[in-house]
Amino acid sequence: MTEYDLPGPAKVCAATGRPLNPGDRYYAVLTDGDDGFVRADYAADAWAGPPPGHRAYWAGTVRPADKPRRPAIDDDALVACFDRLGAADDPDGRSFRYVAALLLMRRKRFRFEDAVRDDAGNDVLLVRDVRGGAVHRVIDPRLTDDRAAAVQVELFRVLGWE
């Protein structure tokens, strides 16, 4: 995979010179420069479309300076955590594994296959790892929405993604 060093937002409109403030809509354009890509940001009301020869453009909203970015999630680390919890028989371990499986499905690393009931009366999700094809059984711990959110926060903290 090729990696590019992309410039960050200028937070100043390239057409008007006016500052772009948190909450403002903008358009960003990448063009070729002598040392790589050149980025220019435009206020939405000053946008006239991408210039000729542009490489890419997109729309966005200026983020507040004090609003932290969402953590980058490492799918492989999340799968490793999920695998380590495979033998967990305690409620916290089952909760962590279930929430990890949901996150991996949301990220399209796991695919939902089926939901079954085991001999002990537990609801069980069957999920397939799209990379290796392995099918995993995940016991549904029947978490409330609040508990699932708390487990996700704790899982992110444990993995260093807070």
Image (cartoon, helix red, strand yellow):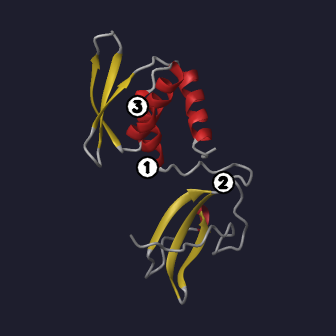
Disc 2 packing (10 Å; few <14; some 14–19; many ≥20): some
Q: Amino acid at mark 2?
A: Arg
Residue 84: percent from left, percent from top: 45, 37
Q: Is residue 132 above or below residue 7?
A: above
The disc, 2 or 3, on the residue closer to the chain's N-terminal end is: 2
The answer to whether marks 2 and 1 mark residues whose Cβ atoms lie closer than 8 Å is no
The disc, 2 or 1, on the residue closer to the chain's N-terminal end is: 2
The disc, 1 or 3, on the residue closer to the chain's N-terminal end is: 1
Q: Amino acid at mark 3?
A: Gly
Which circle, 2 or 3, is nearer the viewer?
3
Q: Is residue 132 left or right of residue 44?
A: left
At x 34%, y 16%, the residue is: 123
In the picture of the structure, the residue carrying the numbered disc 2 is 63
- Quarter where residue 110 is shown: top left
Q: Secondary structure at mark 3?
A: helix
Numbered label attached to residue 76: 1
Numbered label attached to residue 96: none
Image quarter hosting the C terminus: top right
Q: Is residue 36 above or below residue 7?
A: below
Residue 137: percent from left, percent from top: 32, 28
Q: Nearer the viewer, residue 23 or 66?
A: 66
Compute the Cα span from label 1 to label 3.
15 Å
At x 25%, y 43%, the residue is: 133
At x 49%, y 50%, the residue is: 74
Residue 129: percent from left, percent from top: 31, 42
Compute the Cα span from label 2 to label 3.
39 Å
Q: Secondary structure at mark 2?
A: loop
In the picture of the structure, the residue carrying the numbered disc 3 is 86
Q: Amino acid at mark 1?
A: Asp
